[in-house]
Image (cartoon, rainbow, N blue to C red):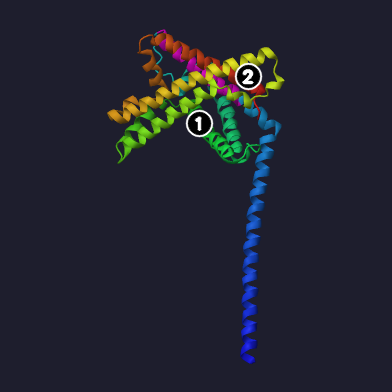
Amino acid sequence: MADRSTAARQGTARGERSSSAAGAVQRGGDAVKGAAGEARDAARSTEQSRTFQLATRAGLICYGLVHALVAWLALAIVFGHGARESDQSGAFQLLARQPGGRALLWVMVVGLAAMTLWQVLTALVGYREEQGARKVAERLGSAARAVAYGFLAVSAGHTAVGGASSSADKQSSATAGVLGMTGGRALVTLAGLVVFGVGVGLAAYGATRKFRERLTMERMSRTTRRAAVALGAVGYLAKGVAYAIVGVLLVVAAVRFDPQRARGLDAALRTVAGTPYGGVLLGLIALGFAAFAAYCVVQARYRKV
């Protein structure tokens, strides 16, 4: 009897300890869920604040200015004015040389940083109306845009403080380093295919007018709506073509083991210029970038933020 009583007490103690451990785990899980919920609520609150929305809309105008400058530099290639670069770095350098340009660069840094934060928050808590794979894809897209906007913000800040090194040179150096690694050619080829895919995706996004889903079309007049759709379609198509060429150049650099061919948007535009009717084609791409710049201004007012 004593042995049975002792065993019963030990079993009860073990059960109590097990129950206590399970309770601790449950409380820990509830605490983690609570913290995650609070973080999501804070992110949503920031995303919905009027100040943040205004900063983001100002950032869209800054983003449009970047594309307008790229378009100007691309046209400089067409007309033989000797623009050394026509990528974003060259655009920032051009702006820095203008009266008041560095001050405007700092404004662009703030605006692009706001856009970066906007896309980070969207990647974390956005697209709540979507479900399953569509939601995952949309949030991954926002994360990729956050990286792109963040890169532009850093590049603009680097130029504003007096930096002069070009993104094309950096890309060439980086590509050379990767090509020298084991399996480097495969990595650069993969990167080229990804960039090419992004270009095709941008062109398709414009051709199908999917960007209309991001605009408050019901607030636009008929004329504004038509202009927004036309500018967005042409702008995304031009960007898609340019990015697809960049992807091809990366693949060529990997195949030929020549990092000098991997020089980003600048090399892509100069490659177009060197083809038959290249001046006409590059002029059309430049006009497309200008159209996208104008579309960014439309987005600044009508984009769903």
For label 2, the residue is 298
Residue at image coords 64%, 91%: 2
Q: Between 152 and 273, which is closer to the camera in this rendering?
A: 273
Image coordinates for residue 137, horizontal then vertical, percent: 55, 37
Image coordinates for residue 57, horizontal then vertical, percent: 64, 25
**Left or right: residue 145 compared with residue 22:** left
In the image, residue 76 sits, relative to residue 243, either above or below, namely above
**Which label sits on residue 274?**
none
Q: What stretch of residues is rendered in magenta?
A: 59-79
The answer to whether residue 218 shows anywhere in this view is yes
For label 1, the residue is 148
Name which quarter of the figure residue 264 lies in.
Answer: top left
Q: Between 175 and 237, which is closer to the camera in this rendering?
A: 237
In the image, residue 152 sits, relative to residue 78, either above or below, namely below
- Within-10-Å neighbours for mark 2: few <14, some 14–19, many 20+: many
Three-letter amino acid code at the position of disc 1: Ala
Q: Earlier in the sequence, mark 2 or mark 1?
A: 1
Name which quarter of the figure residue 293 lies in.
Answer: top right
Three-letter amino acid code at the position of disc 2: Val
Q: Which SS class for mark 2?
A: helix
Which residue reaches farthest bottom? 1
Residue at image coords 71%, 31%: 50
Spatial separation of the CA atoms under disc 2 and disc 1:
20 Å
Total residue callouts: 2
Q: Which SS class for mark 1?
A: helix
Image coordinates for residue 35, horizontal then vertical, percent: 65, 51
